[in-house]
Amino acid sequence: MNKIISTILLFVVVNVSAQVVGNTFVTNASLDNLWLKVQTNADGIESREVFAFLLEATASNWDQQKLNTALINLTSMQFRDQSDPYYGNFIFTKGPRPGNIDENAVEFCMEQGAVLRMYYYDKLNNQNKSLLDELIRLSIIAIQRHQVDITYTNIYVMKTWNLVALGESMGLNIVSQEGYSMLDQWINSISVVGIPEYNSPTYSGVLATNLGLLARHTKNPEAKSKANVAMEFLSYYLFANYFKMGMYLGGPHSRDYNYEISQGNIDQLMGNIISGQSLSFYLQHAVWKPTQEALDVLNKTSRLIICKTGVESEQNFISYIGNKFNIGSSGTPYGYQDKNLVVNIANSTNKLIVNTSYVIEGREDPYGLNPLVTSQGHTKSFHLAKYLIARAQNKNDVVFFVAADGKDRSDTKRLQSHVIIPSSKINELWNGNTKLTSWSSLTSMDLTSEKCFFIKCDNVAVGIRFLLVKDVFGVDIPVTLYNDNISVSAGKAMRLTATHSATTPDSEGVIAMWWRAEEGIGSDAAFTTFRNNMIATVPGITISGDLYTIKVMTPNGELGIKADKSSLQMIENYGNISLPESSVMSVDGVDISSAIFSKSALISTTSFESKLINNPIDKIESVYNTSGILIKKLPSLSFIKNLPSAIYIIKQQGGCKKVAITNVKN
C-alpha cells in the first residue's frame, strides 16, 4: 500500500520578495504589452489584467506615475455608487455595462491585489497606497456580500484566499476570520464528498493557484497547516490524473472549454513542476513542491483513479491512464462544458491529438466553435447540462448510457449525440471491418449494421460500439460519420452523429455505447482480433417501458447499467469499480485520501446526539450513509431521533460533513 508522507509540503520559492532584485527597474515583453493595454485603456481590457500589470510592475520598480495610471483605471472600473447592488465589485471587461454583472470579478482582481498588498505595498508612494487601500476596502464589501456555493469550487477557494489575505494584510481580523471559517468548511466538505467542480483543465488551475497562495502565505499557523493538508490532497489528485505523455490533465473533465483537447491554466503550473516550464510572475507566488508520492504516481502506468465529485453514490469519475492513452468517464454531469466520456491518445511524436469525446447537445455545435455571448458578457460554448448518465467502467472498458430531452436549454433546435474523433495524426480508421482509405475526401457515411467504429494510432486501438441508439419516439436510428473539415489547435476532427430529434424534442432520446481503448496493438493481426472481439460480442439489452438494462461481457468482465429514462435515474450498474469505504480518492484500489486528511485535526467525525442538535432541523437537506446512498431528504426531527446509531453523511447549506449519530431518544 502506498505510504503518504506526513511532512508539511515544502515550497519552491521561500522568500517571495527576492523574486525582484532590490530597487532595480525590471521589465519584459509581456509586461510591456500589458502596459500598452493599460495606457490605452480601451474597451475590452479586463480588470484582472490591470491588476496583473499593477502587481508585477510594482514589484519591478516601475515609475509611480504609470502605477498611478493603472490605479486610476481600476478606480473607474469599480462600482462606487453605494446604491448599486454591486457596490465595491468591478466590471469584468471594460465597456458597456452588461445586463448581468459577473460577481466573480472582484475575487479575480483581489487574488492578485492581495499579493500586492502583502508583499509590495512599500514600493508604492503614499498617493498610490491610498488609492490601493480604497480599492481593497470597497472590494472587501463586495467579497463579503458575494454568496458562493461550496460546490463552485474555484471561486469558493478564491474567495477564501481573498478574505484571509486581505484581512491579514489590512489588519482586519473579522475579515480574515471569515476566510478561516470558509477554509474549515471546504476541507470538511471535500474530505467527505470530494471536489464537485472536478478535474477541469481551466478551473483546477484556479483552484491550485488560490490554495497554493493560502498554504504559502497565510500568517495564521493553524490555517497554514490545514491549507497544506488540502494542498497535499489536491497535489496528489492532479498528479494522479495527469496524462504525462500528452502533458495535460487526463479525462474526464467538468468545465472544459476546448471540446477537442485538454488545455487550461493547470498546464502552466504542472509543466513548471514536471519539466521546469516558465511561470508568470503571479503564479510564481502560488506554485508548490509536491510530495514524492505525488511525483511517483505520475510515473505509474497503468493506473486506475476514482474520485468522488459529490455525496451521491454515482457522483464520481473514473480515469484509466496507460502510457499512450487515457480513457475516463463521469457518473453525473456538472455543467454545460463537461467531457463525461473521453479517450486521449498521445505519443512521443504527437503530444496533442484531437481527443475522442462524447457530446450531447442541441445547438448544432458539436465542436464548440459557435459560442454564445452570455448575459455577463463572456463568450462560451454550451452543450446540455441536465441529462441522465448511467455508466459502468472497469479499467479500459466503459459502458455508457445517456437519456436527454434537451429541455434545460431554451435554444435547443434538435437533439443530437456526437462522438468527436481525430482525423489527423492517426494511422487508421475503420467502419466495422471496413478500412477507410481516404477519409480526408469523405463527406458522410453511415456506420455498418454492427455500428462499430475503430481508431488506430501508433500501437493504441480505440473501439466504439453503439449498442443502442433511439430517437425521441423510441425508434432505432443510424449513426453517421461526418467529415466537416474542421481544423483546431490539436489537428483535424470529425464526428460520429446520431440525431435523436430533428426538431426541438418533446421527450427523451437514448444512446448506449461500449468504449474500449488498449495499447500494445502493434500488428495488423492484433488489431483485427481487437475489432473482431468487439463486433462479435453479443450485448444483453432489455427494455421494459422506460426501464433500460444494458450488459456487455468485456475482456474486463461483465459491465452494464440499469436506468429509468423517464425519471432520469440510474438504478444499478454492473461490474463498475468503486471507491473503498469512506474514501474520496483511490488509485488502483488503494484509498489515498483518508491518510492525507487524517493529518488535519479539523477532520474528524462530529458527535451528533439527536436530542442535542445545535442547528435547526430544517437546515438539514439530506441524510446519506457513508457509501453515498440517500436515506432521507428533508428529514424530520423524529426521523433523526429514530436512526440507528451509526456514522452518516449530513448535507446542509454549508456543505457536507460526516457525523456519528447517537440515538438518544427523549
Image (cartoon, helix red, strand yellow):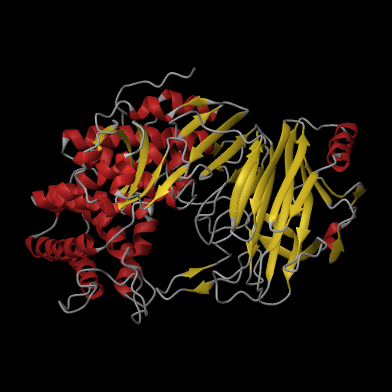
Q: Position of residue 173 (x, y in %)?
A: 9, 48
For residue 447, above or below residue 100: above
Above or below 80: residue 549: above
Classify the position of the C terminus by image quarter.
Answer: top left
Q: Nearer the viewer, residue 606 or 385?
A: 606
Residue with the most extreme front position? 666
Answer with the quarter of the image where residue 445 lies: bottom right
Residue 543 visible, this orientation: yes
Looking at the rendering, which quadrant does residue 500 occupy? bottom right
Residue 205, x across and y down, in percent: 42, 48
Residue 642 vs residue 396, the one in the foreground:
642
Q: State left or right for residue 269 relative to residue 250.
A: left
Q: From this view, report whether residue 575 is shown above or below residue 56.
A: above
For this orientation, the residue located farthest to the bottom is 96
User: Residue at horizontal 58%, vertical 76%?
Assistant: 411
- Residue 316 is situated, as x and y percent measured from the top left of the image, at 52, 42
Return the x and y of residue 554 as percentages of the image width and height: 76, 35
Q: Nearer the viewer, residue 150 or 106?
A: 150
Q: Determine which quarter of the picture holds residue 189.
A: top left
Q: Residue at x 81, y 43 (%)?
A: 539
> In percent of the image, x 55 and y 76: which residue is there?
410
Q: Nearer the viewer, residue 548 or 369?
A: 548
Vertical placement of residue 112 versus 146, above or below: above
Horizontally, residue 35 falls left or right of residue 170, namely right
Residue 60 visible from this viewpoint: no
